[in-house]
Image: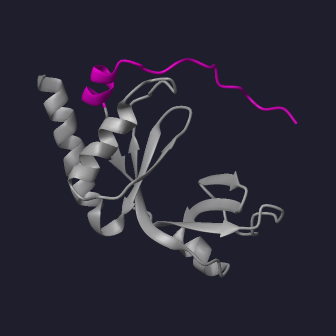
Amino acid sequence: MSFERTPLFRGEGNLDTLLASLQPQLDAAVYVFCTVPSDKPVPANIQPICQFTESEGMTLIVEQTQAAKVGLESVYPCHRITLTVHSDLAAVGLLATVTQVLATAGISVNAISAYYHDHLFVPCDRADDAMACLQTLTTDSQSA
């Protein structure tokens, strides 16, 4: 099997530039967190957007409708907010700053860093509030 490789390049590492360039994007889909035993395959007919193996089991983040369709128990119905700025995986302070802003507003968040972007999973009923907080953070950072 061969596949086309994307050239590797580092993202932005400067915290001030990152905060001024967050460009958060809200995904309207409802996601949930599920778990299955680590020694079992991912259930058929679901496509996790994230899976992570821990000693207790494999965590899956999937669309709520997919989890329900295959009978997976789930928790934390949420929306995903993608910070579309391409952040360097070695950047210092981005998620610390973002999660502190959300915590101050009383918004829980589960953050995941991928190669190109950081993703924030926030409760469905607080997604608009989270977006407003992130927009304010970006605006304040641009004027600083």
Residue closer to the observer: 96 or 42 = 96
The residue lying at 24 percent from left, 59 percent from top is 106
Q: Is residue 23 visible?
A: no
User: In the image, is 102 to the left or to the right of 120?
Assistant: left
Q: Residue 135: give x, y in percent of width and height.
A: 21, 42
Magenta residues (range): 1-21
User: In the image, is 51 to the left or to the right of 27?
Assistant: right
Looking at the rendered image, the quarter that the C terminus falls into is: top left
Q: Magenta segment: does it hold 2?
A: yes
User: In the image, is 99 to the left or to the right of 117?
Assistant: left
The quadrant holding residue 67 is bottom right
Looking at the rendered image, the quarter that the N terminus falls into is: top right
The residue lying at 37 percent from left, 58 percent from top is 122
The quadrant holding residue 9 is top right
Q: Residue 114: give x, y in percent of width and height.
A: 55, 38
Q: Residue 96: give x, y in percent of width and height.
A: 36, 37
The residue lying furthest to the right in this view is 1
- What main secondary structure does the magenta stretch of the protein show? loop
| Position above or below: 122 against 21 | below
